[in-house]
Image: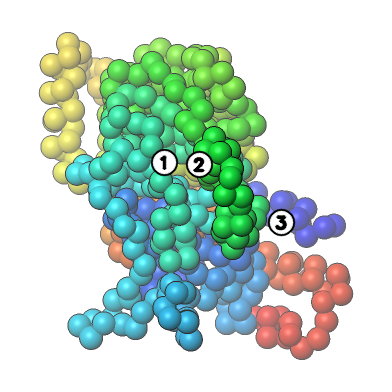
Amino acid sequence: MPLAEVLHLQTIFRNPNEVKPYVVPSPERCNLPAAAIHASSDTVVVVDMNAPAARVAQHKWQPNTPDGHGTPFLFQHRKITAGSAGGTLMRMFKAPTASGDEWRFPQAVAFSVSGIRSQAIVSITCDKEIITGGHADNSIRLISSDGAKTLETAYGHCAPVSCLGLSPDSNYLVTGSRDTTVLLWRIHRVLVSHSNVVSEHSTGSPTSNSSSHVIEKNRRRRIEGPIQVLRGHRCEIISCCVNSNLGIVVSCSHSSDVLLHSIRRGRLIRRLDDVEAHIVCLSSEGVVMTWNESQHTLSTFTLNGTPIARAQFSFFCSISCMQISIDGTSALIGVNSLENDRAYNNSLNSQLNKSGVDFDSESEETDENNRTDLPSPSVCFLDMHTLEVFHVLRLGEGQDITALTLNQDNTNLLVSTLDKQLIIFTDPSLSLKVVDQMLKLGWEGNGLQPLIKS
């Protein structure tokens, strides 16, 4: 079988009981805790929690390949680049400071807005570039992962961007703002080198008119748009997502319903009435999953608004991040513990009482009996159709989850914790299968001997 099919059959969702945690050594060099992580086939990009003025770290790794020391992946911290000519090549790391062992990472230049500093305003594209919101000038910015340089700035909102989301293929971007609108953008991948673009621009005819110059300039822009303005919300947008294959944009806001818009025409397709959500995500099969923080309820709906499943969790836990598998049948949720739970519940009840909701003791007891207790902190595996938890990866005390991501073939799960640890969950037997497949494909020599010893 081809290697891609071998990996597809061995995702962490198929054999969750065989998945084991591996802590990346020297976590002080990993730029943690992270607000966003992206794992490609050879690189791990980590963006810290100071977004939009975030620091960026880029590391080399090779999943499902034993390192000869009992770890089923290769991970190499990015080292200092020596011999850079005139400082033009941005170094990923500088030498440790004399005051401590903290490593310095390149930081994106940004003027942040007070109150907008979360993982909702950071996304990483398939080209390993970072898109950030939350800027004081209401813009979105495209930032390189190698040096944290601002490549492009785009404007469209009348207020700071409060959340954003990328399509799985990184072709479309949606941004939600405090101005109650959702904007749809198209992201273009780089097809020519920067030097070619500069030379082409410098050798252009001086007699060309201004209109052709504007067209040429717009054609080179990486962020095109906004191509659609999606309306219908009455408050600040707090979560949004997009899927280019389905042609759907899902968004939610405070005290508003969940809205579904079309990519092609920008029209409102569906309003999920009386559905309040604080996090929304969309699967490849067209299932909308929502998390209600106030009621601690996880729900799924079809694109037609038909409820599929609903699960209520304990008030003593909170979901910090969610991710759906590539096949759309399973989901991962990062569960953290809530601080001052009693105070939170009292404030919640007082808010509901002010809004005219009467609490009955019997209904409260019945509601509590139906709630599912999840260990915290932990990563829970859910079935998208029933929302039943079929596996739990427990973390240690104080290891609240700040970000999690799956690599492209869903064989490795990367988790960033609040105590500045980067934990990789994977099946160790998978790396041996990959090595066996490499041998069958003709990989020979002493180069594989240290890998096989593990």
Mark 2–mark 3 CB contact (< 8 Å): no
Q: Is residue 189 left or right of residue 314?
A: right
The percent coordinates of residue 164 (x first, y second) are 41, 38
CA separation, marks 1 and 3?
A: 38 Å
Q: Residue, x 40% and y 12% (percent of image)?
A: 273
Above or below, comparing residue 335 to residue 366 in the picture: below
Q: Nearer the viewer, residue 213 or 435?
A: 213
Q: Which of the marked residues, 1 or 3, is nearer the chain's N terminus?
A: 3
Q: Which of the marked residues, 1 or 2, is nearer the chain's N terminus?
A: 1
What residue sits right under mark 1 in the picture? 154
What residue sits right under mark 3 in the picture? 7
Q: Residue, x 74% and y 67% (percent of image)?
A: 433
Q: Nearer the viewer, residue 356 or 233?
A: 233
Residue type indicated by callout 1: Ala
For label 3, the SS is helix
Callout 3 environment at 10 Å: few (<14), some (14 to 19), or many (20+)?
some
For label 2, the SS is strand
Above or below, comparing residue 112 to residue 355 in the picture: below
CA separation, marks 1 and 2?
A: 7 Å
Q: Residue, x 56% and y 25% (percent of image)?
A: 263
Res. 234 image quadrant: top left
Q: Quadrant of the N terminus?
A: bottom right
The percent coordinates of residue 130 (x first, y second) are 45, 52
Residue 319 in view, yes or no: no
Q: Residue furthest bottom?
A: 446
What residue sits right under mark 2 in the picture? 223
